[in-house]
Image (spheres, rainbow, N blue to C red):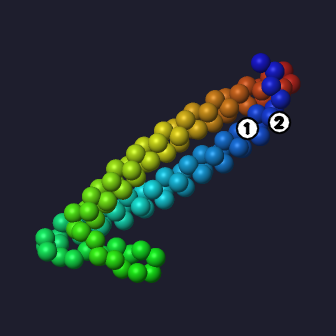
Amino acid sequence: MSANPNDITAKYTSLQHELEEHVIARQKLETQLQENKIVQDEFETLKEDSQVYKLTGNVLLPVEQDEAKSNVLKRLEFINTEIKRCEDNIKSKQTQLEQLRSEIIKLQASQSPQA
């Protein structure tokens, strides 16, 4: 396989950037997960007759406690699914980077003068 070293290097750099974006997205999802877990823990300490409010724009609107709990559970499920998808993407990019790294090393070895 006679690939252009510049093309492979450019692709490697591009993949590194994509990997970095996936890692940042994963970190943001983890933050959201922790925030929603805190909300879920708060719900567990509430009495059944406690009023729950939802911030919509700059207005607090009353919401049924069961509905609010359900919404948080759905958000937690969604975030966990997104984290899994993000981790799969990270693994895929890491594998692709390893393959390109190997190609780059082989190209460099084949281009170096033989003694």
Q: Which mark is residue 28?
A: none
Q: In screen coordinates, is 113 left or right of 45? A: right
Q: Residue at x 46, y 42 (%)?
A: 85
Q: Inspect the image, locate mark 2, and give the three-letter code of the amino acid beneath it.
A: Asn
The image quadrant of residue 31 is bottom left
Label 1 neighbourhood size at 10 Å, few (<14), some (14-19), many (20+)?
A: some
Q: Nearer the viewer, residue 78 or 38?
A: 78
Q: Residues within 10 Å of mark 2 (few under 14, many from 20)?
A: few
- Residue 76, percent from left and from top: 34, 54
Mark pair 2, 1: CA separation = 9 Å
Q: Amino acid at mark 1?
A: Lys
Residue 63 or 115: which is nearer the viewer? 63
Q: Is residue 14 left or right of residue 40?
A: right
The spot of residue 8 in percent (x, y) is 76, 33
| Above or below, comparing residue 24 to residue 110 in the picture | below
Q: Which residue is mark 2?
A: 6
Left or right placement of residue 87 versus residue 15 in this view: left
Q: Measuring 64% from the left and 29% from the top, which residue is drawn there?
A: 99
Image quadrant containing the C terminus: top right
Q: Circle 1 — which element?
A: helix
- Report the mark closest to the observer, 2 or 1: 1
Residue 11, disc: 1
Which residue is most to the right?
Answer: 113
x, y percent for residue 2:
81, 21
| Residue for point 34% across, 77% down | 61
Q: Secondary structure at mark 2?
A: helix
- Residue 20 placement (x, y as % from top left): 60, 50
In this rendering, the answer to whether 31 lies above or below 94 is below
Question: Residue 4, located in which quarter of the rendered image?
Answer: top right
The residue at the point 48 percent across, 39 percent down is 88
26 in relation to 100, above or below: below
